[in-house]
Amino acid sequence: MKYYLGIDGGGTKTTVAVSDNNGKILFKESGKTINFYSVGMDKARRNLDEIIEKVAQKLNTDCFEGVFVGCSALDNEADEKTINALCGGIKSEKIGMNSDLYIALKSVDSHHCPCVAICGTGSMATGEDEKGNIVIAGGWGHIIGDEGSGYAIAVNALAKCCTLCDAGKTSPLLEKANAFFGVDDFRKVIDIIYSAYTTKDLIAGFAAEVSNLCDTDSDAKEIVIEQAHKFANTVIILLNKVEKCTVLGLYGGVFEHNQLFREVFESDINTYFPDVKLQLLVIPPEEGALKLARNL
């Protein structure tokens, strides 16, 4: 029996799917992020090795006919050096690697000029034009970009909390921040935020708390709406380049769990592109990666 492995390495977690040579999905596994820009290459490789070990225990083998990795640290095809650095422990002669957005795009490529927008820990959009060229917008990372992402929502909410704290005010948002980070005084958050052990995905996790406050807290609502508009602007730039797009697939925790964000985003897109159908991905990215693995 031959086995194939598809890997979706997002900013917070990694999900893998395993299939046999007939394309039947046997099972899925998950683990920690393999984004080497976020956690460093050594840790990313250890995280991937842990997941592969789980898979090998279920299969009773660690050898694969083909492997394809989608990684949120990338925005295009990985070179051989990067593949070896991250995936050198995987036993397969055929290993491909590209961005996590690319494998998501392959989940909707049955449509004409498909596009995908991901909004999770980070944000990015991509599409395929009529000539088969891959077009990218966003994906600049959490330091200079990632508008609309969980990280951007969380950081903007924390910045608002700083202003509230300095002014000696209290609010539901500030109380949520204290509870989330386990402090009784918001200024103690400084030690946590700037700790060498605090990762991007931990900070981005606060976005879920902000989302839960949207119905009752004006500060949280304003932040979410602003970030939805900003990411919509990024995707509008993409759709202007992929003129014949018919379907825009949406993926990531922000789209899936923040209704206000998604409503504002979709309204902005529909204003400029009323004929583009917006939908959550029906086929998850790890299955897109699996399809690519079988075609290596």
Image: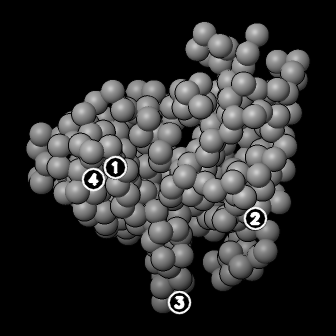
- Identity of the residue drawn at 88% across and 18% down: 60
Q: Spatial distance from mark 4 to mark 1, Cα to Cα?
A: 25 Å
Of callouts 2 and 4, the N-terminal one: 2
Q: Which residue is mark 3?
A: 166
Whether residue 238 is visible here, answered yes or no, is: yes
Mark 4 or mark 3: which is in front?
4
The numbered dot on residue 133 is 1
**Callout 3: helix, strand or loop?**
helix
- How packed is label 3: few (under 14 Cα within 10 Å), some, or many (20 or more)? few
Residue 40 tag number? 2
In three-dimensional space, the C-alpha distance between marks 4 and 3, rounded to whole angstroms, equals: 32 Å
* Label 3 vs label 2, nearer the camera: 2
Q: Position of residue 204 (x, y in %)?
A: 57, 60
Q: Which one is nearer the viewer's eye here, 183 or 285? A: 285
Q: Residue at x 37, y 32 (%)?
A: 108
Q: Amino acid at mark 2?
A: Gly
Q: Secondary structure at mark 2?
A: loop
